[in-house]
Amino acid sequence: MRVGVVPSADGDSIEKIDAALGDDAERTVSEDARTVLDANPTVVVAVGERAVTDLVRADASVPILPVDAGPGLESVPPTDIEPAIADLLAGKWTTTGRPLLSATVDGEYVADALFEMTLVTSEPARISEYSVNVEDERVSQFRADAVVVATPTGSLGYARDAGGPVVEQGAGVVSVVPVAPFAIHVDDWILRGPVTLAVERDEDAVELLADDQSVRPVEPHEPVEITFDGVLELVSVESSRRFFAE
C-alpha cells in the first residue's frame, strides 16, 4: 500500500503515524497536498481540518482518512492513531462520500468547498445586505455580518456556531444561515438548491470564502450560485468518531 500523509503542526501525530506505518507501507509526507497526490497514493492520511480542505482544493480523488479534524469529518482522535493505521493496513476500512459545494460568480466557476461557502464583509464588524434565492424565487433579504451556505458536513461547524441546525448526512440539502443579523427575527433555511446569493447594497466590500480560504471579492448584484458538485471519499475505521458524537 502506498500511503500519503498531509501533516499539521502537531509533530506528535506525525510521529505516531510514521511509527504505526512501520515498514509495511510506502509513504509520501508533505504539507503540500499536491505533492502528496502526485505520488499516486492508495489512501491519504490528513491531520487536521486544514489538511483536508487543502486536499479538496488540490482535487483529491483518493480516499482520505481524517485525523484530529473534528466530528463533522468523523475523524480519528489522536489517541487512536495506532489502531486506526493498523486497520488501514489490514484493509479493515470502508469509505463514505461527502458532497462538495461548487460556486460560480456571474456564471464563472471560482471554487469548491467541503464545509461551507460564505459571503462576508472584508472589514471586521461591518454589515452588508444579502439576498437568498432558489430557482429565481426570493427566499429572503436581510442585513448581517455574513451569510453561510453549509453542507451537512459543515453544519457542525461555523454554521452551527451562527445558530444553524445540524443536518443529517445524505439529506441532499444545504443550510443557509445569516451570521449576526441586524434584525431580531431572521430565519435560517434548509434548501435543496442550487442557492443563489447576492450582495444587495454598494456599501462595504464583500468577499466569498470557500471553507477557510478567501476566493475573490463579490460586487453588488453579482449572482453567486452554489450547488452540489462532486464527492470527497472519506475513510472510516473502527476508531473513527461518529457524526453526531459530541
Image (tube, rainbow, N blue to C red):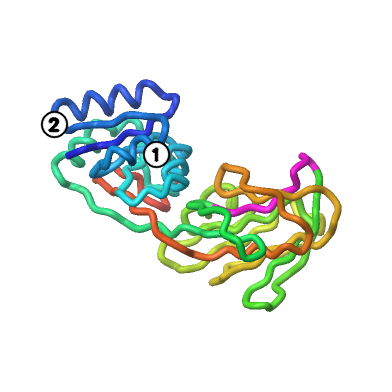
**Label 2 is placed on what type of residue?**
Asp
Point 27% across, 28% down: residue: 17
Q: Over which residues does the magenta segment extend?
A: 116-125
Q: Quadrant of residue 10?
A: top left
**Residue 152 in magenta?**
no
Point 40% across, 57% down: residue: 98
Secondary structure beneath dot 2 equals loop
Q: Is residue 63 visible?
A: yes
Q: Residue beneath label 2, please?
A: 24
Q: Residue beneath label 1, please?
A: 34
Point 81% across, 55% down: residue: 182
Query: Looking at the image, which is closer to me, 21 or 157?
Result: 21
Secondary structure beneath dot 1 equals helix
Badge 1: residue crowd in 10 Å (few <14, some 14–19, many ≥20) = some
Secondary structure predominantly adopted by residues drawn in magenta: strand
* Picture layout, residue 225 above or below residue 202: below
Quadrant the N terminus occupies: top left
**Residue 122 in magenta?**
yes
